[in-house]
Amino acid sequence: MSTSRPSSAALDAPRTRRPSRVVLLLLALLAVLLPAALAPAPARAEPPASVEVTDTTRSVDPEILEHRLAEIDFRTEVRLVVLILDVTEHDLDPADDRALNDAVLDHARSSDPSLLSADGSHWADGTVILALDPNNRFLGSYAGEDVKLSDSDFEAVQDAMRDPARDADWDGSLEAGAKKYASLLHRPWWRHPAALVAAAAVVVGAVVVVVVVVVDARLRLVATL
């Protein structure tokens, strides 16, 4: 009695390769990250609840600057405060890197306590402060705990202010700082550069893996012919 067994041709016949788990995982991540990265920004836009410009140096026209800043949309309601002052008027040394910080704090304590929290240990909730000392070339940004940015985002705001300030465009510097702050405050996670980089990495990884799988399948097919 003879027994039948598959021929060698049948054993070696090419089979359809199922996607690997790595490919499926990459494609799943791509499906989640890519639409989020490309989605439009949230529709909600809130102009500042109030805009206050205090200029002790007569470097800007407060009324005009207030009007320009009032047209900037944030993602939440804020009290936007602009302080233009001279640190030497607060008995501070311009050679001290923290002179502007101390001058803004001194102004708050002596002239506008509403800028501070009840215990005086933080800036008041909902408050965003942009500060500038044209005479001694200082600029800074400060905020209440609920509307503050990360350290790197605070630096980005100051970087946005710096170029106009170098050209003595004080209005432009403060407007650029306010716009940058508005763009960063409560920014959706998928708008963060790291998320965009991750989405791009997933796209590249998925393409590479798919190409490798396709090429490998073709090589196996050729080898069996």
Image (tube, helix red, strand yellow):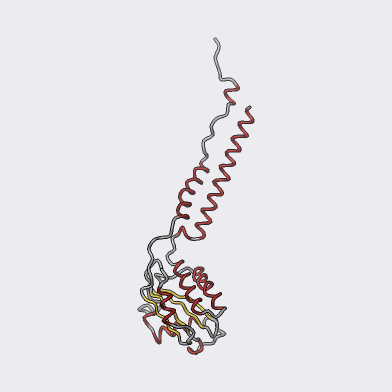
Q: Note whether residue 40 is visible.
A: yes
For image coordinates 47% across by 74% down, the residue present is: 175
**x and y percentages locating residue 45 in the rendered image:** 38, 65
For image coordinates 60% across by 34% down, the residue present is: 218
Above or below for 144 versus 90: above
**x and y percentages locating residue 90 in the rendered image:** 48, 88
Above or below for 223 versus 97: above
For image coordinates 57% across by 85% down, the residue present is: 95
Q: Note whether residue 122 is visible.
A: no
Counting every numbered tag in the picture gives 0
Above or below for 42 versus 175: above
**x and y percentages locating residue 202 in the rendered image:** 53, 50
- Between 107 and 79, the one lying in front of the other is 79
Q: Is residue 214 left or right of residue 31?
A: right
| Quadrant in which the C terminus appears | top right
- Between 149 and 131, the one lying in front of the other is 131
**x and y percentages locating residue 176 in the rendered image:** 49, 73
| Quadrant in which the N terminus appears | top right
